[in-house]
Amino acid sequence: MTFSAKRWREDFPILRPSAKGRWVYLDSAATTQKPEAVLRAVDDYYRRYNANVHRGVYRIAAEATERYEEARQRVARFIGGDPRGLIFTRNTSEAINLVAYAWGLDNLKEGDAILVTAAEHHSNLVPWQLVAKRTGARLRVIPLDEEGHLDLSQLPELLEGVKMVALGHASNVLGTVNPVEEVIRAAHEKGALVLLDAAQSVPRMPVDVKALDCDFLAFSGHKMLAPMGIGVLWGKPEILEKMAPFLGGGEMIGRVEWEGSTWREIPWKFEAGTPNVGGAIGLLAAVDYLEKVGMAAIARREEELGQLMARRLRELPGVVVYGPRGQRTGIVAFNVEGVHPHDVSQILDEEGVAIRAGHHCCQPLHRLLQAGSSCRASVYLYNDEEDVDRLVAAVQKVREVFRVPG
Ligand code: 7TS
């Protein structure tokens, strides 16, 4: 059965063609557009049953609480996890900070190591640096091979003394999917925990925390059709239960005395203050939508379009494409020789093609690639071959404007 991006695209008001024609959105790795179903679910909450959760005993407060907790159950099912381990956060960054602080400050000490990869997003690097500084732990880095795959040849040595492996599942620059099962198995054999930064995997492939056996998983709603400001940390309940809270405040307490307080059970222990109820309801609608499309179908489609984009861009003289030649996701970073990515992106914008330019929050990786920054095109379920044609034609235009040799 062929994948009908056109069919899905119709659900996204922002993507409807204007008088100027079709606008091509290729920046879904930064944030995805939102379908009617999500917009309607959020709108319905604010119009019809907006109320704070877990507090009021009146009718709409009960409805808001019910929907919020239903979102927790539904999103947990989407990733194959126990809902008691599902904590709503603002985004992936906050989810990772939660673990770095609430787990790291109590479990890391001088001489311990935290293992990351050379392709980490700053969100899965800087929190660990901050906590390493406070605890005396050290960061260690899994290197990459020429194509951007993890070089796991030294993994047993790299794991010596490691307490936490904080690992990106799918790269937001290279388009690689890391062999996380292998790393998780090896880490567990050495007694280390594993946090997966799944910001780019949960939106574009089936992810099952039980099958993976990861200890923590972090992702953002806004990269998977949901509104901004809602994210998820999933953790194994038995680990979360032993952790101290991250933030203190209302909602997360059991009993409060002047001298100290007790905490609610998980997951509420980690949700201080009024949560983003509308966001969670939007994420529930997003997950329903994604399952209707089918995560396996989305993954296949991503791979097809990613391969096509990488191949077509590589055919253009003076264009360098980063990442693997083989299997990849629909995230493709590239550079046009001698042209700054901001100039590329500006010309593309004039051609009605939106891509991202910059270091994509991966400065150490860009230094490895020997590029200060790059252009990045990323697809989602609403993109198709015509969008790839438009991208390639617009990059051709850049080559002409800047007289790129070839
Ligand atoms: N980890 C990865 C792999 C990411 O791609 C991102 C966001 C994050 C963590 C942080 O997510 P946030 O929702 O907390 O911001 N990446 C990007 C990007 O590539 N362009 O814009 C945001």
Image: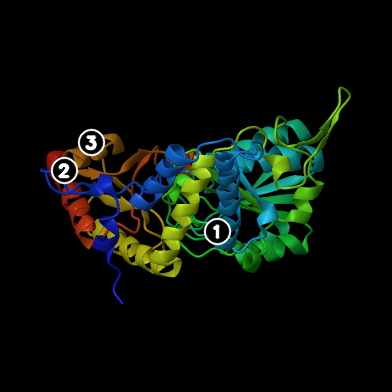
Label 1, on which residue?
Answer: 150
| Disc ID at residue 346 | 3
From what the image shows, is residue 306 above or below residue 340? below
Q: Farthest residue toward the bottom?
A: 1
Q: Amino acid at mark 3?
A: Gln
Q: Position of residue 93 (x, y in %)?
A: 56, 40
Callout 3 secondary element: helix
| Disc ID at residue 93 | none
Taking the spot 74% from the left edge, 47% from the top edge, the residue there is 266
Taking the spot 41% from the left edge, 50% from the top edge, the residue there is 225
**Image quadrant in which the N terminus is located:** bottom left
Which quadrant would residue 295 be assigned to in this image?
bottom left
Taking the spot 54% from the left edge, 46% from the top edge, the residue there is 120
Callout 1 secondary element: loop
Callout 2 secondary element: loop
* Side of 252 relative to 372 (left or right): right
Q: Amino acid at mark 2?
A: Glu
Q: Amino acid at mark 1?
A: Leu
Taking the spot 78% from the left edge, 60% from the top edge, the residue there is 190
Q: Is mark 3 within 8 Å of ligand 1?
A: no
For residue 162, say whether it is visible: no
Camera-nearest residue between 60 and 178: 60
For residue 75, say whether it is visible: yes
Task: Give the mark nearer the N terminus: 3 vs 1.
Answer: 1
Label 2, on which residue?
Answer: 351
Q: Position of residue 29 (x, y in %)?
A: 40, 48
Q: Position of residue 289 (x, y in %)?
A: 41, 59
